[in-house]
Image (cartoon, coloured by chain):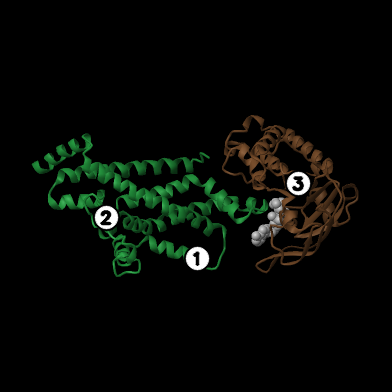
Chain colours: A brown, B green
Amino acid sequence: MGLLPLIASGAVVRRRENLLIGPVDLRLDGTGITIVIGPNGSGKTSLLSMLHGVLRLSGGDIIWACPLAEARRKQGFVFQSPILLRRSVRENLTYPLSLLKTPRNEARAKAVDWAARVGLGDALMHPARVLSGGERQKLALARALIRDPEVLFLDEPCSSLDGRATREIEEILTGAAHSGTRIIMSTHDMGQARRLGDEVVFMLGGKLLEFCPATAFFDAPETEQSRAFLRGDIVE
Amino acid sequence: MTDIWEGLVHAFRLLVALDPDLSEITLLSLRVTLTAVVIASALALPLAALLVVRRFRYRRTIIAVLNALMGLPPVVVGLIVYLLLSRSGPFGVFDLLFTPTAMIIAQVIIILPLIASIAHQSLRELWSDYHDLLISLNTTQPQRIGTLIWDGRRALLTAALAGFGRAIGEVGAIMIVGGNIDHATRVLTTAIALETGKGDFALALALGFVLIALAITVNIAIHWLTRTETEGRW
Ligand SMILES: Nc1ncnc2c1ncn2[C@@H]1O[C@H](COP(=O)(O)OP(=O)(O)OP(=O)(O)O)[C@@H](O)[C@H]1O
Ligand SMILES: [Mg+2]
């Protein structure tokens, strides 16, 4: 059974009486890449974590097309600052598979494959801590993709990558999207948003101000705030 | 002065000749303390991990009790274990008083809180690093505990070694529940106390050297482990 559609209705997260995010009403369907944009502190990370299910809802619902435990297993999440295990690159890659009791040989073969795909083939046996910032992000991405998730959340996955590495990551992401992984990612890079986005979510102050096809958003943004944001002005 | 000098010379002779009494006492010390460390670690390390990953009702109370128990004077532990194991005590039927088993029990009680506390501290740090990832990967409770124990193994070994250091040098509790019986429950510390009392400095000093050597070895190991840990040699 597939994960999608994902339906959020009136989903709200509060922290100590303050509204962190919401109410969010949204339906994610089909295939492709949804880009989440908005200024710092607008709630991009919160939205992704909420949909992923690691923020406890204070109200409303988030419903996947399959039971929750199964839904969690079929999702991947790449954090804004990569969290790496104090292990080798290879052990980092095999970890999510070992949780699913994948045979060790099979897991290792996949690790070799994914390390090569993100350009870490030579670093397989290095401890993860010696990696550079960009390499850490690539490792975190490969570790999320190794389980072949149906839905992948990425929180600014290219924020510390140079142009070339960004392109490499984008290729991997479009490849994954073509083979059926539904991607929801936040970014500050409007070029990247245009290159990758099929749909755009524009966030401000914990609310979804716009949620529409990417072409519509970039050609004719609906709200004053999104026009200001795209111009690079300060958005209140 | 000549007494001490003669004692030193004689002590070295005992060490070099691997004196049977000396070896027997040293081996018993190691056997008792290593057993106590293994048992205490087997209980304390999973407990520490559980206290870190799980928010249950009496978590804070348990942590407070562990910290309080760390300050328990070993002599008092000895007294309590004595009362529990003595003929008229609740566990008197097992006839354990004045056996190495009694000494192991006392040492476990003394070092378990120490090991658990040190382990808890370092695992808490690791958990705050790993928390979001392990939650996101939808790990089960046992998987979280296993991951923390494995990735924190250096720090945990340090905790166990600290327990070893405390237990090997302990004398009060061991003396009370073991009784310092020759060829049965005589260990390094109690033998030193006895021989010094008798004025036989040679054996006392030889035993003392062994004890110091063990303590230094343990401390070097702890130092080395902590250094590799903080340098992030993972
Ligand atoms: N646990 C929390 N408790 C209280 N406030 C929080 C918590 N988490 C996030 N916030 C606040 O919620 C707001 C949105 O945070 P979020 O991390 O979602 O923003 P963001 O859009 O991802 O920003 P950035 O572009 O800087 O990554 C911020 O003002 C932040 O301070
Ligand atoms: Mg963010």
Q: Are marks 3 and 1 on the same chain?
A: no
**Chain letter belonging to callout 3:** A
Q: Position of residue B179 (x, y in %)?
A: 24, 57
Q: Position of residue B116 (x, y in %)?
A: 45, 56
Residue at which label 3 appears? A149
Residue at which label 2 appears? B171
Dot 1: within a 10 Å radius of its alpha carbon, few (fewer than 14), some, or many (20 or more) residues? few
**Chain letter belonging to callout 1:** B
Q: Is residue B211 visible?
A: no
Image quarter where the N terminus of chain B lies is top left
Gap in Å between the C-alphas at discs 1 and 2?
Answer: 32 Å
Residue at which label 1 appears? B60
Q: Residue at x 67, y 69 (%)?
A: A17
Q: Does the residue labelled 3 lie within 8 Å of ligand 2?
A: no
User: Do labels 1 and 2 touch, CB within 8 Å?
Assistant: no
Residue mark closest to the camera, 3 vs 1: 3
Q: What residue type is labelled 3?
A: Pro
| Left or right placement of residue B224 versus residue A19 in this view | left
Q: Which amino acid does label 1 sit on?
A: Arg
| Left or right placement of residue B19 versus residue A182 in this view | left
Image mark for residue A235:
none
